[in-house]
Image: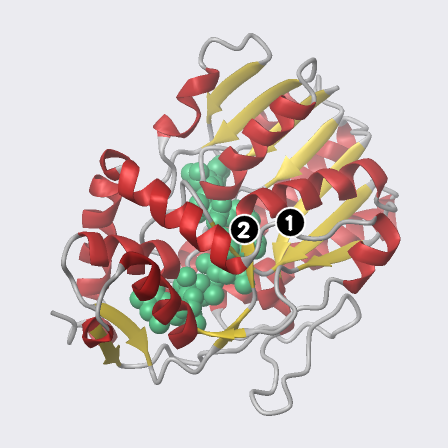
Amino acid sequence: MRLLVTGGLGFIGSNFIRHWISQHSKDQITNLDKVTYAANPDNLTDLDSNSNYRFIKGDICDQSVVDQLMSNIDLVVNFAAETHVDRSIDDPLLFVKTNVLGTYTLLKSALKHKIKHFHHISTDEVYGTIDHETKDEFSETTPFDPTSPYAAYKASADHFALSFFKTYDLPLTITNCSNNYGPYQNPEKFIPRVITNLLTNKKIPIYGKGENLRDWLYVDDHCRAIETVIEHGKVGETYCIGGLKEACRNIDIVKKILKIMGKSENLIKYVTDRPAHDNYRVSWKKIKEDLAWEPQESLDSGLEKTIDWYQKNQDWWKKAKIEAENFYQKLDNYKNLK
Ligand code: NAD
Ligand code: DAU
């Protein structure tokens, strides 16, 4: 099989490509990535000598590049996106192009080239927020109610994708996943930010009171879930993916990391909250019952592996860390962090 993977130099995309090649060594993968600040070209250097893998630097919004690559492809897996909620609050327009127009460009080309399967990667954030008290959960039937500009553009892309299935019969599946963590995640995101702050003797910024709820999934489990949906999912269907039975408060994640790293809770610093800060909990009942997928990594073991990786790979994150902290410095809301 010939795959076009977009955004494959980012966090989940690079983990997915490595996973797919390990399971399907004869398949050919083309990785189309614009190499934004979020990409790291070193993520897949271990595949440099693999003749079944090639990297193309390019933009999913560029119809001519997309058309050229799509002409020899069976399966498209679309990871490419602007992904950071805080950046979407700072500069929403940037997100429209890649997350909406980019996805549309890929869908149009996939249709033109009669692609056998288009798998679109989305997020649980399209569903908005759960009630903090009742702790209800998102599922595939929850109406879209996005909160951040990032989530609004992802929701828009999901609507476009499903409309291409309904209107033009493009064979398509979608997965809406909760928060991922693990190796190769940009240190602008919460868990790697906490770990790398501790490794560089900085305090840990917690937005608001640290009460916000998230569901966490180890990235390898997400990659297996995507593979399961591609291989066994029903065309036209959406599958929610999550990792926990109960949603977890941000403060509890931080306390777990501090404990594993042997650091003091005095390092916690509460900072101004994110605007429209939401809460998530996602039900993964459908993918479990219909496709027999479930997460294998526990939160504790996943955090231990992740901390170990960031400790051992400081050269990988040092440059991105400077860039990330420069971004946070720029944001008025987070300026009070020392
Ligand atoms: P990331 O920010 O680490 O990587 C995104 C990648 O996309 C980068 O390599 C970047 O260079 C590339 N890219 C951006 N714009 C592009 C464009 N116009 N053309 C080609 N490439 C472009 O992202 P991630 O965390 O790995 O997320 C991947 C996908 O999974 C996204 O669609 C995201 O919405 C979704 N998702 C992420 C999470 C999470 O917790 N990280 C959870 C659920 C869903
Ligand atoms: O739910 C899936 C989504 O998870 C993905 O679609 C997004 O691409 C991904 O970035 C992630 O979004 P979040 O907003 O949940 O992730 P983030 O890592 O930015 O923040 C996680 C939680 O931690 C959130 O409640 C905000 C809080 N936070 C974050 C940072 C960076 C802090 O308290 N302090 C911080 O410094």
101 relative to 2, above or below: below
Estimate the spatial distance between the alpha carbons at disc 2 and disc 1, rounded to whole Å.
9 Å
Q: Taking 185 as reference, is 24 left or right? A: right
**Which residue does the image show at 23% across and 34% down from the upper left?**
315
Asked where in the image residue 277 lies, by quadrant, the reply is: bottom left
Q: Position of residue 163 (x, y in %)?
A: 79, 54
Q: Taking 118 as reference, is 49 left or right? A: left
**Which residue does the image show at 60% across and 12% down from the upper left?**
52
173 relative to 285, above or below: above
Q: Quadrant of the N terminus?
A: top right
Does residue 67 appear in this view? no
- Secondary element under disc 2, as helix, strand or loop, is strand
| Amino acid at pointer 2 | Tyr
Asked if ligand 1 lies within 8 A of label 2, the reply is no
The image quadrant where one finds ligand 2 is: bottom left
**Which residue does the image show at 57% across and 56% down from the upper left?**
298
Asked where in the image residue 206 lies, by quadrant, the reply is: bottom left
Residue that carries the numbered disc 2 in the rendered image: 218
Q: Nearer the viewer, residue 13 or 327?
A: 13
Residue farthest to the left? 338
141 relative to 192, above or below: below
Does residue 169 appear in this view? yes
Mark 1 crowd level (few <14, some 14–19, many ≥20, 10 Å Cα): few
Nearer the viewer's eye, disc 2 or disc 1?
1
Q: Position of residue 127 (x, y in %)?
A: 64, 71
- Secondary element under disc 1, as helix, strand or loop, is loop
Tags 2 and 1 in contact by the CB under 8 Å rule?
yes
Q: Which mark is residue 296?
A: 1
Q: Quadrant of the C terminus?
A: bottom left
**Which residue does the image show at 24% across and 74% down from the upper left?**
265
